[in-house]
Structure formats: structure tokens, C-alpha cells
Image (cartoon, helix red, strand yellow):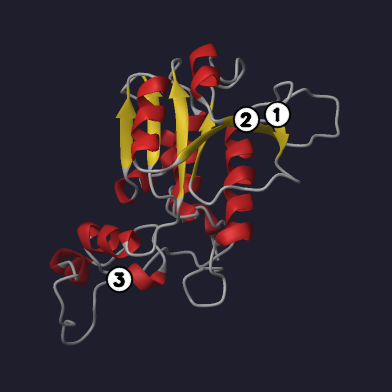
């Protein structure tokens, strides 16, 4: 089998050679959540089998019934390539919302079109983000290796929380630090003083999942 012919957006390099499903065979299923075009032409999107042939709007509506209580925010002053990857991870862990702080336009390449299924909000400043979150009862916690930060591995993780990440390199801006309800750091044991922003985001989100997500049913997809 030649795996070089796989669709370029498929993240699983050793699975079936063809992603998704072809045209529906037989009488079409009933339900407004099905997309007539996908039923006729096939569904090659990078979605779990639960959502094959569903319209995008129907998928988002179903996800909205199950979203988790954590939010993710990223400062966007330098068109950071990590933003798209963080959005993709937020979709995988079913974040309530993703917030872009700063420049409205952001690098979507790493999102792999998952931003279509995720609620993404823009805020001009970190103060605007903090005000929005506090109005809906969500705390804002920055993630950076700052002096005095709580340790992610031992801290009491808030259930209603927004994880705020700074730009790759400089980390959280001064304005972001001023409006955070707290900051926490991730333990490191090597020679570098920091880890990649998208890697830090994945660690933080998964820590929330380990603490609060319902893993007992069929809601968690494991391949």
C-alpha cells in the first residue's frame, strides 16, 4: 500500500490509505444534520466517524452540547505560527472558546481547518479579555515560567478557567501579566528555560481534562 498518496491534511500517517468515506450507498439517511452534497460525493474531512456526512453547522451544534468549562487565549502580536496549533488542540480537547488577543488576523495554517468547529473570539487587549471572562465567571490564568508562579503539577486547577499564553519567545506581555488572576508554570528538567507555546498549551489543557473531563462514556474519542 502506498501511503505517499494520503490526503495532505490527514494527521494519521499509518492508517488507511484513503481518508473518510466515499458516496453514501443505498437510500440516504433521514435527518437535517446530513449534508446532501457529502452524501452524494463522499466525506473526506478530518472528522471522527460520529460526524461523517454531517453539515458543519450540525457538528458545531452537537459539540456545543458537550463543551468543557475551560477557555484558551493566545496573545497575537507577531502572527505567531503556534496559534493555529493551539486552536487545533483546543478543538481536540473541546474548549469552550478560543480567544485571540491583539492582531485580529492570525496564522491559521496549523489549525488544519479545526477553527471551523471552534468558537473563536477576538479581543483588542488582555484587559478586554479579562473583562469578558470575569463577566461570565471565568478566571484568567497565565502560563509562563515567572517567579512566584504556582506549579501546574501541584496546584488546585480551577474548573472555570482561561489559560492565557504569550508569544513564542517573549512570553506573556506586561499588560497580560497585570490582568491575570494568577500564573502557573510547567516543570522542566533539561537545559532550556522554556518549552514551545503550543506544547505548553497542550499540557495545560490535558491537565484540565485529567481533572474534570468525563471519561466514562463514549464522549472521548481514542481512535
Indicate which disc, 1 or 2, sits on the residue closer to the N terminus: 1
The structure residue drawn at horizontal position 43% and vertical position 20%, both measured from the top left corner, is: 79
Q: For the residue carrying disc 2, how many other residues have a C-alpha within 10 Å: few (<14), some (14-19), or many (20+)?
A: many
* Horizontal and vertical percent position of residue 220: 51, 68
Question: Upstream in the sequence, badge 3 or badge 2?
Answer: 3
Q: Is residue 108 visible?
A: no
In-image side of 143 versus 68 (left or right): right
Q: Foreground residue, 39 or 54? A: 54
Most foreground residue, 2 or 74: 74
Measure the C-alpha gap from mark 3 to mark 2. 48 Å
Query: Between residues 182 and 15, which one lies in front from this camera angle?
Result: 182
Contact between labelled residues 2 and 1, with CB atoms less than 8 Å apart: yes
What element does badge 3 sit on?
Answer: loop
Looking at the rendered image, the disc whose residue lies closer to the viewer, 3 or 2, is 2
Which residue position holds label 2?
A: 183
Can residue 217 be seen here? The reply is yes
Residue 38 point in image, percent of width and height: 21, 65
List x then y, in percent, for residue 23. 24, 73
N-term mark: 1 or 3: 3
Q: Are marks 1 and 3 in contact (CB under 8 Å)?
A: no
Q: What residue sits 64% from the left and 51% below the top?
A: 207
Q: Which residue is mark 3?
A: 22
Q: Quadrant of residue 22?
A: bottom left
Is label 1 or label 3 in front?
A: 1
Q: Is 21 rendered above or below residue 93? A: below
Q: Eyeballing the image, is 24 above or below 179?
A: below
Is 85 positioned to the left or the right of 120 in the image? right
Label 1 sits on residue = 149
Image check: 204 left or right of 11?
A: right
Secondary structure type for disc 2: strand
Amino acid at each position: 500500500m502506498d501511503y505517499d498518496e494520503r490526503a495532505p491534511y490527514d494527521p494519521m500517517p499509518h492508517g488507511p490509505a484513503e481518508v473518510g468515506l466515499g458516496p453514501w450507498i443505498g437510500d440516504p439517511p433521514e435527518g437535517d444534520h446530513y449534508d446532501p452534497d457529502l452524501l452524494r460525493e463522499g466525506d473526506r474531512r478530518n472528522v471522527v466517524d460520529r460526524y461523517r456526512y454531517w453539515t458543519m453547522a450540525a457538528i458545531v451544534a452537537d459539540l456545543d452540547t458537550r463543551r468543557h468549562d475551560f477557555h484558551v487565549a493566545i496573545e497575537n502580536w507577531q502572527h505567531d505560527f503556534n496559534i493555529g496549533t493551539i486552536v487545533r488542540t483546543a478543538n481536540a480537547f473541546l474548549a469552550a472558546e478560543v480567544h485571540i488577543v491583539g492582531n485580529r488576523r492570525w496564522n491559521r495554517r496549523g489549525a488544519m481547518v479545526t477553527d471551523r468547529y471552534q468558537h473563536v473570539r477576538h479581543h483588542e487587549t488582555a484587559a478586554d479579555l479579562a473583562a469578558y471572562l470575569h463577566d461570565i465567571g471565568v478566571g484568567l490564568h497565565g502560563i509562563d515560567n515567572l517567579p512566584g508562579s504556582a506549579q501546574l503539577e501541584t496546584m488546585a486547577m480551577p474548573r472555570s478557567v482561561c489559560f492565557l499564553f504569550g508569544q513564542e519567545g517573549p512570553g506573556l506581555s506586561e499588560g497580560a501579566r497585570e490582568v491575570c488572576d494568577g500564573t502557573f508554570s510547567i516543570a522542566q528538567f533539561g537545559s532550556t528555560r522554556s518549552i514551545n507555546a503550543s506544547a505548553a498549551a497542550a499540557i495545560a489543557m490535558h491537565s484540565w481534562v485529567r481533572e474534570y473531563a468525563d471519561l466514562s462514556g463514549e464522549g472521548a474519542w481514542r481512535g
